[in-house]
Image (cartoon, rainbow, N blue to C red):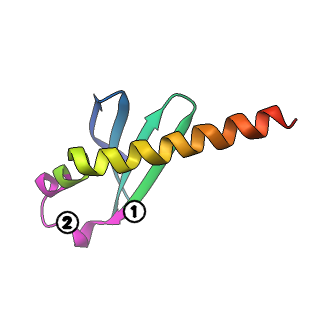
Amino acid sequence: MRVIKEFTKKDIRVSIFSWNNKYLIKYEQGMIEQTYKVNETDILEEGDLEAFFSDKFLAEINKRFEEMHQSLRNQIENI
């Protein structure tokens, strides 16, 4: 697995890896993470990965994080 890029944007840690002819795009926030796999053949060049860091896409990622955090809190309270 090769690390292509790592950075933080709007309190979300983003890591991009190249592995098995796929790009793995991992978003982390606290104890929660989301990973998306994209075939390398769907991306013409690594610069095209920037679309996955747009404000609109990150807002969608953040909304899912909020839902995931709430689900985790609810589950912990039910233990």
- Residue at (22% x, 44% y) in the render: 55
User: With 44 as the anchor, is 57 left or right in this view?
Assistant: right
- Report the label total: 2
Q: Whole-percent x and y of residue 58?
A: 31, 45
Callout 1 amino acid: Asn
Question: Does residue 43 show up magenta in the picture?
Answer: yes
User: With 40 as the anchor, is 33 left or right in this view?
Assistant: right
Callout 2 amino acid: Ile
Question: Does residue 67 show up magenta in the picture?
Answer: no
- Residue at (34% x, 64% y) in the render: 38
How packed mark 2 is, by other alpha carbons closer than 10 Å (few <14, some 14-19, many 20 or more), is few
- Would you place residue 43 above or below residue 18 in this image? below
The residue that mark 2 highlights is 43
- Residue at (88% x, 35% y) in the render: 79
Q: What element does badge 2 sit on?
A: loop
User: With 47 as the anchor, is 63 left or right in this view?
Assistant: right
- Residue at (14% x, 57% y) in the render: 48
Dot 1 or dot 2: first in sequence order is 1
Q: What element does badge 1 sit on?
A: loop
Q: Which residues are magenta?
A: 38-49
The residue that mark 1 highlights is 20
Whether residue 27 can be seen here: yes
What label does residue 76 carry, if any? none
